[in-house]
Every structure is written in structure tokens, then in C-alpha cells.
Amino acid sequence: MTDTPDMLCIGSVLWDVIGRSASHMRQGSDVPGRITRLPGGVALNIAMTLARFGLRPALLSAVGQDPEGHELAEACEKLGCDTRFLYRSEDLPTDRYMAVEGANGLIAAIADAHSLERAGSRILRPLSDGTLGTPQTPFTGSVALDGNLKETLLDEIVRDAAFAKADMRIAPASPGKAERLMPFLRAGRGVLYVNLEEAGLLCQDSFKSAPEAAAKLIERGAARAVVTNGGDAACDATADGLVAERPPEVLVTRVTGAGDTFMAAHIVAELRGAARAEALSLALDAAAAYVSGDIAS
């Protein structure tokens, strides 16, 4: 096997095209602002945060051989992410995400992750061909997995021997893809990172608070659930009980990538030995710094 990275980040690696305005917006708004293009995607956002904390994460995803793909892979390396295991397709274009944010938060977003979905299990080959592991000698480190993968593939991962010993950390790519995580809920595998809306979709219910939602996820079979709720209290729940804390109050200047930053900071804190309450607090601080603009994109 090759040099083992500190953590694997599996899922979307793409270009984020983000339009931001200081104005409050609604449907049909036409306002001045700034449009940026940045490396992004749930898996890459998590990996970039891990790299900022001094880890060397590896990306398992699909990136095209088009000019955008070559530029993206080079950018990932410069950001401290290991790109050796990317599936570089000659016939699939590099994926993209587009969002519009106003002073009142995220207005709308479209995720074009069709190449990742079409690549399917090909992005996981390093975990079974001996590069990072095999079904007989599975990868034993931490894995961050995002819900941009198809539910059929996520269901295969739950049962795949190549993941049997991994520390699985799972997040949906968006509320619209939250139900793709049902295989992990049914199997009681991994740590689920969801917001209040996503928890409601997984439980087919609605909740007023993160502790209420997290407790219900455990009741429904989750091994562990970490639920966020914007500026209100977040909660980490296991069968042993709940830990909740309110995030710091900050001026919000951006929202895209905040959940991924929270998840990555939480994972780093635990990898470094933090107890549940401390890890939750450190992750909330990191997310608050991100949305306030104190951490660079």
C-alpha cells in the first residue's frame, strides 16, 4: 500500500460559483454583488478544513480531464489535499455548484454533480485494489463521506467489507439529498452530521430544536448524530446521552461551506483526543469564524 493519508474525503470535488450580495434578496431580485469561482464540494470543503488544521487528507472523487479539471486538481494540491486517488475521467466533465447568497442567507443553489454520480463505484477502487486497502485488509482510518453519491452506492458502502473498520463520518450534500443517508440510519453505522431540516427529512418528522432531532435520530437507529440549527444550539447524541451547546453570535457574511467546516473541525478535535463537549464547542467556534469571514475560503 502507498503512504496512508490522515483521512479520506469521499464525494464531491468541483468548482463553486458563488454570487454574493450585501442586499436582502427574494425571488426575482436583481442586485449588485460579487461573483467568485472557488474549489468546493462537500468532500473538498471538508478536506480543505482538515488541511488548514495540519492534516493531509486524500480525495476520492471524479474530476474530468477537461481544462477545468486539471485546474481544479492543481488547486487541490496547493490547498494541501492529496489528489493521487482521484478518478480522472476522459469522458465526464468536471462538476460544478452554483449558489446565490444575500444578506438574508442562501437564496438558491444548483448542484451539478452528475459526473460523480455517473462515475459511481469507480471512485472507490483504491479501497479494494490494494492501494489503500482490500476487503480482506480494510482501511482502518477515518472517512468523511458526502451524500452526493447515489443512494444505491451509499447502500453498497454500508455493506462493503472494505469499509468495515473505518471510522465513518457522513453528511448529506443538501436537504434535498438527506434521504440518501437512510442506509446508514438503518444499519446504525457511522456518525451522521445533519442540520435540523435534514434530520426532519430522515425521521419524516419536524423538530423545534437540535437536541430533539438528535434524540429522535438515535431512537430511529443512528449510532451517533450531530445536529446543527443555525444560530441556535447544536447537539451531539449517542445512546449514552446528549451534549448540546449554542454557537457564538457573529455577523454572518457567507453560508456556503459552513456545515462542512463545522464537520471537519469536529472530526479534527476528536482525532486530537477532545471529549464530546469540547469537540462540539471547538467545531462551533470554527464554523462561526468561517461564516463571519475570519477564515479564508
Image: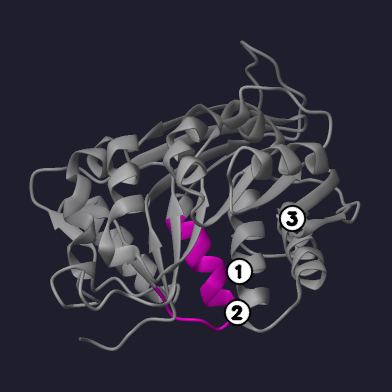
| Highlighted range, magenta | 43-57
Q: Please give left or right for residue 119 compared with residue 172 in the image.
A: left
Q: Residues within 10 Å of mark 1 (few under 14, many from 20)?
A: many
Who's the residue at 71% across and 55% down the image? 239
Tell me: residue 217, above or below residue 293: above
| Residue receiving disc 2 | 271
Who's the residue at 18% across and 68% down the image? 128
| Residue receiving disc 3 | 236
Q: Residues within 10 Å of mark 2 (few under 14, many from 20)?
A: few
Of callouts 3 and 2, the N-terminal one = 3
| Magenta stretch: includes residue 236 | no
Q: Which is nearer the eye, 262 or 239?
A: 239
Of callouts 3 and 1, the N-terminal one = 3
**Amino acid type for the residue under numbered disc 1:** Ile
Q: Please give left or right for residue 179 compared with residue 157 in the image.
A: right
Mark 3 vs mark 1: give the one in front.
3
| Residue receiving disc 1 | 267
Q: Is residue 159 visible?
A: yes
Circles 1 and 2: CB distance less than 8 Å?
Answer: yes
Tell me: residue 210, above or below residue 3: above
Residue 75, horizontal then vertical, whole percent: 37, 66
Q: Please give left or right for residue 272 compared with residue 37 in the image.
A: right
Tell me: residue 12, above or below residue 113: below
**Amino acid type for the residue under numbered disc 3:** Asp
Tell me: residue 259, above or below residue 70: above
